[in-house]
Image (spheres, grey):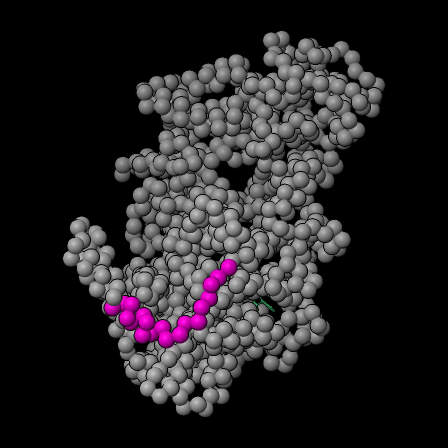
């Protein structure tokens, strides 16, 4: 049977409503339609269930969202369709698994766990298990229920039902034996007799998740949680006892956007970077299983279960002995379009997976018998084993098996008597107390501290004496602040020394001295650990429901006046107009190579269409989409087109950006602090990058307010002398690795170093060149302004498009109007001579690229090494170009965009300690250039580059890498180019 797949779309949240969000999802029966907000193109997907929970509901007094129209799927309906199936299957003795997949905030937890009166599938089905058990009056039928709860974070498996302090450093081990299949060694299992007990255990698990995420500085949305119910029915008939057993895995996966960066771009995961690993491998497992089920298994597809902790644990649920249901949570807003589309594609693949569920009858006796046989075999192998490693492995397996089988022999009743501490009394919340506010709503309010025993000191585990509340974060001092009571019984908060004030905030303001806390005060300790102070029964100016993680972070950023314009000097209010300055006519080289067939000549820098990224070229979009459609079996229905989606107004975009910035700043701050703690010369900066238009037609096209914006983090690594621009996702990944490095005091190998990447080329900016003169067959020598991605000026580019005859000779006269050219063939030469004032930080290996309609993407050579004034001397002759109506119109109305790229270089710092060994990297040269090497070789490399240019015309983009390599090789050979080394001092 196939995996059943359901998708569910949630309502807009308050923030989305405030930002005027637009809807991009529709549902019709089992079909879900997503509409591309840019093009209005719809794509549809069909699933077992498409649950519409976006609108059409009313709120009952207790907060339950009740269906008001037929389309709305409330929690009850979702439970009946999915949860009840799971229970029925469990009753029949099948293993079951229910997954929730989707980006952070899309509604996974709402469906699985629920909030308040809107209970999700897990609590309702847990409750239902005991309702059904209580209905049984047959003395020969007994039930046993056990639960466990684990978390996978950074590939480490932790038991959520044991105190955080007892967690093993490296996490729990995953074992596998023939008899038992995969199991997590030493995972605590808790016998339960009522839903109330399960609820308490879930609370405990969530509290441990919250404490864990503060003490280990983990990000909860990156963790996967698995709640497992082992359900057994024991049937006694005379002297024989048969059991039917089912394992129900309820899985709340980490936000799917975490898989995007590596999954979508195919970028190699950094060695040791395990943050995304489980989700990426889950994607590969689903992909491989989907192919297998479609009979594409000719060569024997290997399913990569063993590559991640998540897929190992859930091996049965995916393509194995389990009835599996996947709920994919969808955000309705156009801003999340890309992520939602990728969720739908994921779901589309998952529905193809076939499982082979069987009833697990009398499994215990069978398992114990098989385990005994397996252990005998292991003992025999141990006797024969050669090699210490193998011997250790076999012994560990044997011990794990023995522990497992003795645990199996302990009766449920005995286990029940043994676990007394499962249900500890709750912390008293009747007096003043603080509770945590987590990014994950589900984990907010789980950690509570009251003030029965004051003073309470907050700090890091290295604090001496050890603080009472531990927070692991570089911005928190070993002993950071103190909560106390004054003589009037007021609760006070005070930084321990003045340096702590930098990272101690109440209601957004820094705390410099002892202050009295008021009901509903928001306390931020460090960069992002948030607590809410409460005095039950007191009134406040603000409603508790209005306070969440985003609120508190934005409040701080507003109070600290973190403002886009203030923080982002690179984002000017006014963009300089893209001026063109007339220059002296450029002498035309007579010995130009001639090409009769456009783009096919060697040295013509022609990039085959197959290698060209068409994404940004609107004229190519249609083909691109239909191809994709074919691959993913999505259907396009123009009749569903754009009515639901409109681009939000610039003002809303700005607000969205502001809110994302408010969240990013503390993280970037933290990364800088960690880098300092690790004694690394690395500086992180937030950058707002403008997506510069590919085509410019109207004045408005050059209006920065209308440009799409992207947030990036610039990383200047002075240990390696390199600069990179990272996506926020990538930055967050690396931050997790940095936290781990600091916590565990590890010194990673170069391959694992989160602060190294291959040298990276970036778009410096774009210049826009008028084609009007070409339409009249005039040349047009201009210096065009390069507009930088930050909206400023990134230098000037000298270029010309010279109309010629077939032999490359300049023409003397042209037509009266461009229309006269329609239907005729023209010849012209594009010349890009040089650039000036290229920003120092990216003036390495500079080259230009443009896309002339119908002629594909063309590139100049790469000017090798470092220069603010790179020379390209690029000349490319195009012959017999047909002027059709489109080109004629294009020349009159549009400007040609020339993109300028360069590689980021930072000033290299010489440290006392030996220089970091340069890592080797699959996708980049092993010999990463340091600034000196490139600079040392500049003179020589420049000469070589220019010579290359003249003789070869153009070079492939790979040239950058090659030239770096060449420069490095020459440096190694002692080719110093001494004079230029002095100029290097500008860094
Ligand atoms: N179907 C729904 N109806 C009403 N509100 C919903 C629905 N789904 C989600 N929400 C609301 O949207 C917010 C985010 O949902 P939720 O916490 O479930 O997301 P998530 O995908 O689990 O996020 P995370 O990955 O951070 O855990 C919550 O406030 C939740 O109440």
Q: Residue 464's image quarter?
A: bottom left
Name the spot of residue 149 as percent of width and height, x first.
Answer: 40, 70
Looking at this view, is 675 or 63 the one in front? 63
Query: What residue is shown at x 38% (from left), y 37% (from top)?
Result: 921
Query: What residue is shown at x 36% (from left), y 36% (from top)?
Result: 920
Q: How many labels does the image show?
A: 0
Q: Can residue 120 be seen in this view?
A: no
Query: What residue is shown at x 62% (from left), y 50% (from top)?
Result: 633
Q: Residue 246's image quarter?
A: bottom left
773 over 482 or under it: above or below: above
| Residue 907: in magenta span | no
Query: Magenta segment, which residues?
Result: 354-372
Name the spot of residue 661 as percent of width and height, x first.
Answer: 54, 52
Q: Can residue 789 be seen in this view?
A: yes
| Residue 363: in magenta span | yes
Looking at this view, is 915 or 814 the one in front? 814
Asked whether, in this view, residue 598 is left or right of residue 124, the answer is right
Name the spot of residue 960 as percent of width and height, x first.
Answer: 47, 27
972 over 906 or under it: above or below: above
Asked whether, in this view, residue 630 is left or right of residue 818, the answer is left
Name the spot of residue 715 as percent of width and height, x first.
Answer: 45, 42
Q: Residue furthest left?
A: 383
Query: What residue is shown at x 51% (from left), y 58% (from top)?
Result: 353
465 over 132 or under it: above or below: above
Question: Quarter of the image containing the C terminus?
Answer: top left
Looking at this view, is 511 or 47 the one in front? 47
Asked whether, in this view, residue 743 is left or right of residue 686, the answer is left
Image quadrant of ligand 1 equals bottom right
């Amino acid at each position: 049977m196939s995996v059943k797949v359901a998708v569910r779309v949630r309502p807009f949240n308050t923030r989305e409503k405030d930002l005027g969000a637009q809807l991009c999802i529709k549902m019709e029966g089992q079909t879900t339609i997503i509409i591309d907000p840019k093009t209005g193109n719809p794509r549809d997907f069909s699933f077992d269930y498409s649950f519409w929970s976006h609108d059409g509901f009313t709120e009952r007094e207790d907060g339950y969202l009740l269906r008001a129209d037929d389309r709305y799927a409330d929690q009850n309906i979702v439970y009946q369709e999915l949860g009840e199936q799971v229970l029925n299957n469990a009753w029949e003795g099948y293993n079951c698994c229910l997954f929730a997949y989707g980006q952070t905030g899309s509604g996974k937890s709402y469906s699985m766990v629920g909030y308040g009166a809107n209970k999700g599938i897990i609590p309702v089905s847990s409750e239902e298990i005991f309702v059904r058990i209580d209905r049984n009056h047959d003395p020969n039928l007994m039930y046993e229920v056990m639960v466990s709860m684990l978390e996978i974070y950074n590939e480490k498996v932790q038991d959520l039902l044991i105190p955080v302090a007892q967690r093993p450093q490296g996490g729990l081990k995953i074992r596998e034996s023939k008899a038992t299949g995969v199991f997590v060694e030493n995972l605590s299992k808790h016998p339960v007799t009522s839903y109330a007990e399960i609820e308490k255990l879930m609370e405990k698990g969530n509290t441990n998740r919250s404490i864990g995420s503060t003490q280990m500085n983990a990000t909860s949305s990156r963790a996967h949680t698995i709640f497992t119910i082992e359900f057994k029915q024991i049937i006694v008939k005379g002297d024989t006892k048969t059991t039917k057993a089912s394992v129900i895995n309820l899985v709340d996966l980490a936000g799917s956007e975490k898989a995007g960066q590596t999954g979508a771009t195919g970028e190699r995961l950094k060695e040791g970077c395990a943050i995304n690993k489980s989700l990426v491998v889950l994607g590969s497992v689903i992909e491989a299983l989907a192919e297998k089920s479609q009979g594409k298994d000719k060569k024997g597809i290997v399913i990569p279960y063993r590559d991640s902790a998540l897929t190992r644990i859930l091996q049965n649920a995916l393509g194995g002995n389990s009835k599996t249901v996947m709920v994919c949570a969808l955000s309705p807003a156009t801003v999340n379009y890309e992520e939602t589309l990728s969720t739908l594609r994921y779901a589309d693949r998952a529905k193809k997976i076939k499982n082979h569920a069987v009833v697990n009858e009398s499994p215990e006796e069978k398992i114990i018998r098989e385990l005994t046989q397996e252990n005998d075999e292991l003992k025999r192998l141990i006797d024969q084993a050669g090699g210490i490693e193998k011997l250790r492995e076999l012994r560990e397996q044997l011990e794990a098996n023995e522990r497992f089988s003795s645990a199996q022999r302990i009766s449920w009743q005995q286990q029940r008597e043994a676990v007394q501490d499962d249900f500890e009394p709750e912390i008293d919340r009747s007096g003043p107390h603080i509770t945590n506010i987590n990014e994950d709503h589900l984990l907010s309010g789980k950690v509570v501290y009251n003030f029965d025993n004051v003073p309470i000191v907050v700090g890091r585990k290295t604090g001496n004496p050890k603080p009472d509340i531990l927070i692991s974060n570089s911005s928190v001092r070993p002993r950071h602040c103190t909560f106390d009571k004054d003589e009037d019984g007021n609760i006070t908060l005070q930084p321990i020394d003045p340096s702590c004030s930098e990272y101690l905030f109440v209601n957004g303001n820094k705390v410099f001295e002892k202050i009295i806390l008021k009901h509903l005060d928001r306390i931020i300790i460090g960069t992002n650990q948030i607590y809410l102070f409460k005095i039950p029964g007191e009134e406040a100016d603000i409603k508790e429901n209005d306070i969440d993680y985003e609120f508190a972070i934005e409040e701080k950023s507003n109070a600290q006046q973190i403002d886009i314009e203030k923080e982002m000097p690179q984002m000017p209010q006014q963009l300089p107009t893209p001026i063109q300055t007339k220059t002296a006519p450029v002498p035309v080289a007579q010995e130009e190579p001639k090409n009769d067939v456009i783009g096919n000549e060697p040295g013509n820098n022609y990039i085959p269409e197959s290698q060209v990224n068409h994404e940004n070229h609107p004229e190519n979009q249609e083909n691109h989409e239909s191809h994709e459609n074919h691959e993913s079996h999505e259907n396009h229905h123009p009749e569903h087109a754009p009515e639901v989606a409109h681009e939000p107004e610039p003002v809303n975009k700005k607000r969205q950006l502001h809110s994302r910035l408010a969240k990013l700043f503390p993280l970037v701050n933290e990364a800088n602090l960690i880098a300092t703690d690790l004694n690394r010369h690395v500086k992180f900066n937030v950058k707002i990058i403008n997506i510069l238009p590919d085509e410019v037609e109207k004045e408005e096209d050059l209006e920065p307010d209308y440009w799409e914006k992207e947030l990036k983090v610039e990383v200047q690594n002075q240990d390696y002398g390199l600069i990179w621009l990272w996506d926020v996702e990538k930055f967050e990944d690396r931050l997790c690795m940095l936290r781990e490095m600091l916590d565990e005091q590890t010194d990673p190998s170069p391959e694992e170093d989160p602060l190294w990447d291959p040298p990276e080329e970036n778009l410096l900016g774009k210049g826009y060149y008028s084609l009007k003169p070409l339409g009249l067959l005039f040349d047009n020598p201009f210096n065009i302004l390069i507009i930088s991605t930050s909206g400023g000026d990134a230098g000037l580019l000298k270029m010309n498009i010279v109309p010629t005859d077939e032999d490359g000779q300049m023409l003397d006269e042209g037509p009266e109007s461009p229309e006269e050219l329609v239907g005729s063939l023209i010849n012209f030469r594009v010349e890009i001579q040089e650039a000036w004032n290229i920003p120092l930080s990216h003036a390495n290996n500079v080259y230009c690229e443009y896309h002339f309609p119908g002629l594909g993407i063309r590139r100049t050579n790469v000017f090798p090494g470092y220069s603010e004034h790179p020379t390209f001397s690029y000349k490319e002759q195009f012959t017999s170009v047909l002027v059709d109506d489109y080109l004629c119109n294009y020349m009159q109305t549009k400007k040609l965009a020339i993109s300028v790229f360069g590689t980021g270089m930072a000033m290299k710092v010489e440290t006392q300690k030996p220089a970091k060994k340069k890592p080797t990297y699959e996708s980049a040269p092993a010999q990463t250039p340091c600034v000196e090497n490139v600079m040392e070789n500049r003179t020589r490399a420049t000469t070589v580059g220019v010579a290359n240019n003249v003789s070869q015309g153009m070079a492939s983009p790979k040239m950058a890498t090659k030239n770096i390599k060449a420069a490095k090789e020459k440096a190694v050979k002692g080719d110093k180019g001494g004079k230029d080394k002095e100029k290097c001092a500008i860094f």
